[in-house]
Amino acid sequence: MKKGVLLINLGSPDSPKPKDVKKYLGEFLMDERVIDVPLWARTLLVKGIILNTRPKASAKAYQKIWWEEGSPLIVLSERLQNKVQSKVDYPVALAMRYGSMSIKKGLQELVDQGCTEIKTVPLYPQFAMATTETIDVLVDELVTEHFPQVTITKTPAFYHRQDYIDVLTQSIAEKLEGLDYEHILFSYHGVPERHIRKSDITNGNCKMNGKCCFKKGSPQHEFCYRHQCEITTVNVAKKLGLKNGTYSTTFQSRLGFDPWLKPYTDRTIERMGKAGVKKMAIVTPAFVSDCLETLEEIAMEGEEIFHEVGGKDFTVIPCLNDRDDFAQVLATMIEEWATTPETASV
Ligand SMILES: C=CC1=C(C)c2cc3[nH]c(cc4nc(cc5[nH]c(cc1n2)c(C)c5CCC(=O)O)C(CCC(=O)O)=C4C)c(C)c3C=C
Ligand SMILES: [Fe+2]
Ligand SMILES: [Fe+2]
């Protein structure tokens, strides 16, 4: 019985050309856990509308952040993979939920090395139907169809692990050391409010009114993205010693006309600038690797909004990327799995 690990991130287009962006967005947005409407409506919306307009605009945005080595998200995920590999004795492969580096190829790579027990690690600290769940479901389907000899152990969201909170806090403290700032924004990728209701195993408990997500002990929290984002902020703020009113949680990157989780990041940046905040810091804890949504939407567009309304200093805290201490958190999670009695080799 040989063990192996598959790290899984979101994925990026093969290049920032409109045709590659279109192909990538087509796969991403046709996922029923991302655009969660009946197939006919999804096809109409995605293939009939979004793919006719968005790829050109998205390609322009990708071109602004693309590196010589490729997509920042992919390059940074590969660096993280190498760091984690240097800390554990099991093969560590990398795959993406969408795009060319498929999960099927990642599983095959581990199987080719003789692995029959594989731990899948979605690189998302907080659970969401559009991220962790779609990975878990696809892994199950692929194993049933192509790798029936493989046993899979899934990895739940790790937003509440103390070592993760310590590393995130440390990354913020390092960037802000000696800097004067008035407010820290914790900006998470948004999801439609409907997604939160769909993942509500307590049938209607999550009211998205700011109370349910802080109620202690609700079984719903295991699947509530909003709860997990709010608690990430609270735990880091506590550790940083931030005073109430000097930090807040917001949600970015909305798509379409349905209500998404609020407050929205762009509107909050604008409101704070208008209210006289001059020095703002922003951290994006839903993203493990810097990507389009942090490098372009936050660091470029966000800063522009802030400056337009009179803000001055806009400090963007990098994602955890391939920090050594973050790679160590993942390595510890892997060791914990490998040495539990059910999975430990005899
Ligand atoms: C926390 C992780 C993410 C969640 C939750 C998420 C939900 C979600 N996203 C879209 C639509 C788009 N997201 C796009 C880019 C993108 N999204 C994430 C992560 C989460 N998405 C990342 C890391 C990235 C960047 C990828 C990269 O290559 O750098 C895009 C593409 C870019 C664009 O055209 O704006 C879209 C579209 C939906 C609809 C959704 C939940 C329903
Ligand atoms: Fe997204
Ligand atoms: Fe909730």
Image (spheres, rainbow, N blue to C red):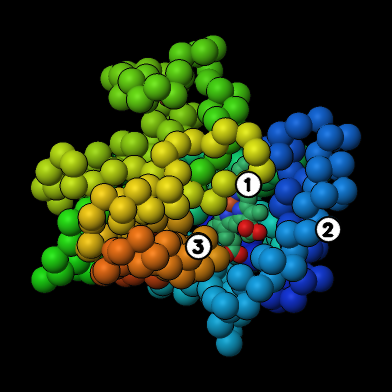
The residue drawn where x is 45% and y is 44% is 264
Lateral position of residue 179 relative to residue 207, left or right: left
Tell me whether the residue at label 3 lies in contact with that at label 1, contact meaning CB atoms closer than 8 angstroms. no
The residue wearing badge 2 is 52
User: In the image, is the residue at mark 2 within 8 Å of ligand 1 by its beta carbon?
Assistant: no
Please state the horizontal and vertical placement of residue 159, each as a whole percent of the image: 36, 43
Question: What is the CA distance from the residue labelled 3 to the residue labelled 2?
Answer: 21 Å
Mark before the other along the chain sequence, 1 or 2: 2
Q: Amino acid at mark 1?
A: Leu
Tell me whether the residue at label 3 lies in contact with that at label 2, contact meaning CB atoms closer than 8 angstroms. no
The residue wearing badge 1 is 255
Residue 177 appears in the figure:
no
User: In the image, is the residue at mark 3 within 8 Å of ligand 1 by its beta carbon?
Assistant: yes
Q: Amino acid at mark 3?
A: Glu
The residue drawn where x is 26% and y is 69% is 313
Comparing 52 with 144, the one in front is 52
Secondary structure type for disc 1? loop
Residue 262 appears in the figure:
yes
Tell me whether the residue at label 1 lies in contact with that at label 2, contact meaning CB atoms closer than 8 angstroms. no
Instruction: Report which quarter residue 311 is drawn in.
Output: bottom left
Question: What is the CA distance from the residue labelled 3 to the residue labelled 1?
Answer: 13 Å
Task: Say the numbered circle drawn on residue 297.
Answer: 3
Secondary structure type for disc 2? helix
Please state the horizontal and vertical placement of residue 282, each as a whole percent of the image: 32, 58
Comparing 116 with 217, the one in front is 217
The residue drawn where x is 80% and y is 56% is 51
Lateral position of residue 51 relative to residue 320, left or right: right
Q: Amino acid at mark 2?
A: Asn
User: In the image, is the residue at mark 1 within 8 Å of ligand 1 by its beta carbon?
Assistant: yes
